Image (cartoon, grey):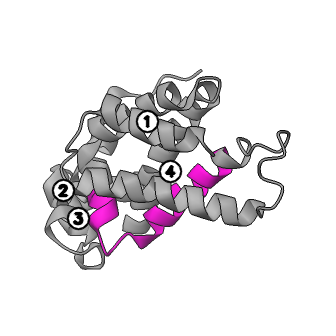
């Protein structure tokens, strides 16, 4: 595996941090490449070495977080709901600025959709089809209901400044999902 130059990683992190900071201040559509370059303390050309434009930068940033969540989901699905959800809520807490910005920003409405799609993809494998409990329910309706409920709790928790610790919220959401 090729080792990436630390200067490249440092520049990329500065660009990602800059775009998130700027999104807390103004709408994404109003942010320019020059704004990002100025905030990251780099040249405009450096941005174009790594990304096609600001949309590509935001897309890669979102994709990186979704991929981290996806990697956690691969091993978390072997646990009971409460224990499986704890690392996710800890991740949301650790990356509070990113998630609060993405969920609050009018300039990034696609983020909620991508988060929802990731979540419903994971829930699809968890639908109880063997016990006979869900035979009268449409899988699509179950996924819409559960996915929107889960994303809604994440939004509520983050927008309200995480009023309870990750352990408490994971336990509550886990209890709700157990009955599913």
Judge whether 62 appears above or below 71 on screen: below
Task: Give the mark nearest the N terminus, 2 or 1.
Answer: 2
* Residue 87 part of the magenta-drawn span: no
Q: Quadrant of residue 87?
A: top left
Callouts 3 and 2 close, C-beta under 8 Å: yes
Disc 4/disc 3 C-alpha distance (Å): 17 Å
The mark that comes first in sequence, 3 or 1, is: 3
Q: Earlier in the sequence, mark 4 or mark 1?
A: 4
Q: Sequence-wise, which precedes: disc 4 or disc 3? A: 3
For residue 155, say whether it is visible.
yes
In this figure, which residue is indicated by the disc labeled 3? 23
Q: What residue is at 45 percent from the left and 63 percent from the top?
A: 112
Q: Position of residue 13 (x, y in %)?
A: 30, 41
Observer-side mark, 2 or 1, equals: 1
Q: From the image, tell me which residue sits under label 2.
A: 21
Q: Secondary structure at mark 2?
A: helix
> Is disc 3 placed on a helix, strand or loop?
helix
Label 4 residue SS: helix
Q: Main secondary structure of the magenta part?
A: helix
Q: Are marks 3 and 1 in contact (CB under 8 Å)?
A: no
Residue 83 x, y percent position in the rendering: 49, 25
Circle 1 sits on which residue? 88
Which residue in the rendered view is the most extreme toward the bottom? 30
- Of the two numbered discs 4 and 2 on the same chain, state the one appearing first in sequence: 2
**CA gap, disc 4 and disc 2:** 18 Å
Image: 50 above or below 3: below
Q: Which residue is mark 4?
A: 63
| Label 3 – label 2 distance at C-alpha | 5 Å
> What segment is highlighted magenta in the picture?
100-122
């Amino acid at each position: 595996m090729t080792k990436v130059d630390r200067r490249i990683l440092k520049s990329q992190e500065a660009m990602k941090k800059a775009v998130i900071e700027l999104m807390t201040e103004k709408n994404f559509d109003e942010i320019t490449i020059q704004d990002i370059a100025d905030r990251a303390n780099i040249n405009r050309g450096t941005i174009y070495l790594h990304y096609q434009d600001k949309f590509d930068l935001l897309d890669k940033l979102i994709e990186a977080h979704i991929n981290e969540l996806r990697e956690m989901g691969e091993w978390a699905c072997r646990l009971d709901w409460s224990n499986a959800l704890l690392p996710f809520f800890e991740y949301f807490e650790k990356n509070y600025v990113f998630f609060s910005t993405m969920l609050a920003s009018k300039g990034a409405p696609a983020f909620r959709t991508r988060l929802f799609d990731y979540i419903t993809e994971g829930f699809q494998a968890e639908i109880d089809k063997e016990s006979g409990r869900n035979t009268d329910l449409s899988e699509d309706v179950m996924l819409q209901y559960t996915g929107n409920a889960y994303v809604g709790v994440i939004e509520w928790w983050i927008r309200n400044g995480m009023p309870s610790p990750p352990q408490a919220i994971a336990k509550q959401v886990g209890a709700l999902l157990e009955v599913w």
